[in-house]
């Protein structure tokens, strides 16, 4: 297994649109294992393939406190949603920034797992928020883009400054 490099906002590659996975094979499973390891070591509760510069529709999520409830979603689709949830979100690609975003409170997701089997999952609370956040990455959307233009400018400036300081 390997720890993958996570793209940092405002990297342009975070805005690429991921393609559907055509075949779930050993390459896919290896990527999923590496994504999970990268997420756990960060540590984070979710990671999209886009964040490791692989533009395929794959996300991994684990919101458990015990870090043993890995959920893998390949080609995820939200087939039902209801309610509104406001949750403070963070992102491994936007370190140190936490902002409140509106999401659906309950969702039903259909996806394929790492063995190629289709499944449907009902999610609510943090899990639902996390799935929506990660699925946004697959369409090139970072959570800070829900904020006001002024806030986004401030965040970009802050992160660019931090990047310069660490180089
Ligand atoms: Ni994120």
Image (tube, rainbow, N blue to C red):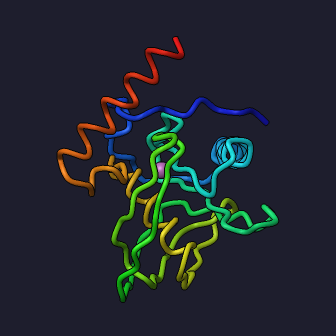
- In percent of width and height, residue 5 lies at 59, 29
Q: Quadrant of residue 92?
A: top right
Q: Is residue 149 left or right of residue 144?
A: left
Q: Residue at x 50, y 49 (%)?
A: 91
Residue 31 image position (x, y, % from top left): 65, 42
The answer to which quarter of the image holds residue 77 is bottom left
In the rendering, at what x and y percent does residue 83 appear? 36, 88
- Residue 109 x %, y %: 48, 77
- Looking at this view, name the residue that lies furthest to the bottom: 82
Q: Nearer the viewer, residue 73 or 151?
A: 151
Of the pair 125 and 61, the residue shown nearer to us: 125
In this orientation, which residue lies closer to the viewer: 34 or 134? Answer: 134
Q: Quadrant of the N terminus?
A: top right
Q: Which residue is pictured at 26% across the width and 55% down the height?
A: 147
Name of the residue lying farthest toward the top: 167
* Depicted 102 relative to depicted 138: above or below: below
Q: Nearer the viewer, residue 132 or 103?
A: 103
Where is 93 relative to 77, above or below? above
Q: Is residue 90 left or right of residue 61?
A: left
């Amino acid at each position: 297994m390997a720890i993958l490099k996570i793209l940092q906002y405002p990297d342009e590659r975070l805005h690429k649109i991921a393609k559907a996975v055509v075949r779930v094979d050993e390459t896919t499973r290896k990527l999923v294992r590496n994504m999970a390891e990268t997420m756990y070591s960060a540590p984070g509760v979710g990671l999209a393939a886009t964040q490791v510069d692989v533009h395929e529709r794959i996300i991994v999520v684990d919101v458990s406190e015990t870090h043993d409830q890995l959920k893998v979603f390949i080609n995820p689709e939200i087939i039902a949603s209801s309610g509104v949830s406001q949750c403070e979100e963070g992102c491994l690609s936007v370190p140190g920034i936490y902002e409140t975003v509106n999401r659906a409170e309950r969702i039903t997701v259909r996806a394929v797992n790492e063995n190629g089997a289709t499944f449907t999952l009902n999610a609510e609370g943090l899990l639902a928020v996390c799935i929506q956040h990660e699925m946004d990455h697959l369409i090139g959307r970072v959570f800070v883009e829900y904020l006001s233009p002024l806030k986004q400018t401030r965040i970009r400036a802050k992160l660019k400054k931090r990047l310069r300081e660490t180089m």
